[in-house]
Image (cartoon, grey):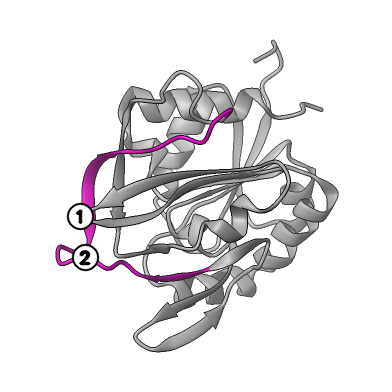
Amino acid sequence: MNGTRPTVALLDYGSGNVRSAFRALAANGAEVTLTADRDTCLAADGLVVPGVGAFAACMGGLRAVGGDEVIRARADAGRPVLGICVGHQILFDSGVEHGHDSAGVGVLPGVVERLAAKRLPHMGWNTVEPAEGSVLFAGVEDAWFYFVHSYGVHAGEALVGLPGVRVTYATHESDRFVAAVEAGPICSTQFHPEKSGEAGAHLLRNWLGSLPVG
């Protein structure tokens, strides 16, 4: 990272552990603003989208502040976005919960669905299978990260077929799912980097260091 602290807008739409995310981003070199202001979110070097809870509820909160439009606008302009946990999930086309299909932001292809595992939620530390050439996982390829979720994306093949896209996987019981995505300006993690100790801090520094500043 260069001597200039990158500006990061932490999207405030009523979902997510924003305090821990704010502290982690600031501790690892970002100038962070917690905001739902459209202009601030569009102008920042990076936008972080947190999220916890139900897919549909998070999408409702996101739409209420115009966050879905902001994410799409940044994606179209090649401006970096990082989604975390449900903030990762809502970037996909749709989510299926309790038989109900809810539209997502749609900047990544795929459907969020319940994990095929007996023990849910998938909660605790797990390893991942980083994609070859990953920027996010450089230096933490063998690290453990902290997950809390019952839903995920299985059809990573739709992502892998896109030019320049890197997909990282994790496995809970025998169910293999998408743990992280790097797709041009769009990055996302199913796990919580802000709760993943030094490995998560390293990943955040990798992302912050990749931001075009100014």
Residue 65: say if magenta. Answer: no
As for residue 126 lying within the magenta part, the answer is yes
Q: Which quadrant would the C terminus be assigned to in this image?
A: top right
Q: Is residue 59 above or below residue 149?
A: below
Q: Secondary structure at mark 2?
A: loop
Q: Earlier in the sequence, mark 2 or mark 1?
A: 2
Q: Is residue 142 above or below residue 64?
A: above
Residue at the spot of label 2: 117
Between residues 18 and 182, which one lies in front from this camera angle?
182
Specify few, some or many for label 1: CA neighbours under 10 Å numbering under 14, 14-19, or 20 or more.
few
> Is residue 123 positioned above or below 193 on the image?
below
Q: Amino acid at mark 1?
A: Glu
Instruction: Report the side of 81 relative to 204 (left or right).
Output: right
Is label 2 in contact with label 1 (beta carbons under 8 Å)? yes
Residue at x-position 51% and y-position 36%: 131
Q: In this image, 82 relative to 123: left or right?
A: right
Residue 129 location (% of width, % of height): 40, 37
- Read off the magenta span: 111-133
For label 1, the residue is: 173
Whole-percent x and y of residue 33?
Answer: 61, 41
Camera-side residue: 105 or 57?
Answer: 105
